Image (cartoon, rainbow, N blue to C red):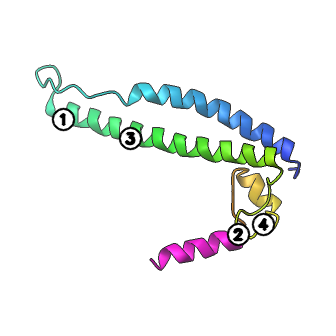
Amino acid sequence: MTSDPRTYGERLQSELDALIIDIAESNDAGGTVELDQTRVGRLSRMDAMQQQAMAKNTHERYGIRRRQIEAALARIEAGTFGLCCLCREPLDSERLDSDPAVVFCADCAEAREQERGQR
C-alpha cells in the first residue's frame, strides 16, 4: 500500500461510515430485558441478558474504534499522520497498512506494554 495520507484517509473514512451504521444497529440490540417470567422462562431470560451484555460490549468496542478513526483523520488534517505519538518517528508502512489508526511505533508500543505489565 502507499504511504500517502489521503489513501489512508479514504480507507479510514470508509471504515468510519460502515462503523456508524453498525453503531446505529447495535443500539437496538442493547434494549432492556423484560422481567415478566410468565412470558419468558428463566433460562430464556438469562440468555437474553447475556445477549444484551454482549451487544453492550460490542457497542462499546465500536465507540472506541470510532474515536480511534476520528483521531487518525484529525492527525491527517493536522499533518501529523504517520508519526508515532510518543517519539515522533515515522511509523512503518506495514504497521499503517495493518491499522491506519495506529498511534505508536512498534518500539514505543512494546515499551508501553512492558510498563503496563509492571504495574
Mark 4: secondary structure? loop
Give the foreground label among 4 and 3.
4
Give the foreground label among 2 and 4.
4
On the picture, is 58 further left or further right than 76? left
Give the foreground label among 1 and 2.
2
Q: Are marks 4 and 3 in contact (CB under 8 Å)?
A: no
Indicate which disc residue 54 carries: 3
Give the foreground label among 4 and 1.
4
Q: Amino acid at mark 4?
A: Arg
Mark 2: secondary structure? helix
Mark 3: secondary structure? helix
User: Which residue position is annotated with label 1?
Assistant: 43
Residue 50: x and y in percent read 30, 39
Q: Residue at x 82, y 64 (%)?
A: 90
The Cα–Cα distance between marks 4 and 3, rounded to whole angstroms, is: 37 Å
Towards the viewer: 89 or 16: 89
Indicate which disc residue 88 carries: 4
Mark 1: secondary structure? helix
Image-quadrant location for residue 96: bottom right
Relative to 92, does residue 27 appear above or below in the rendering? Answer: above
Identify the magenta region: 107-119
Q: Amino acid at mark 3?
A: Met
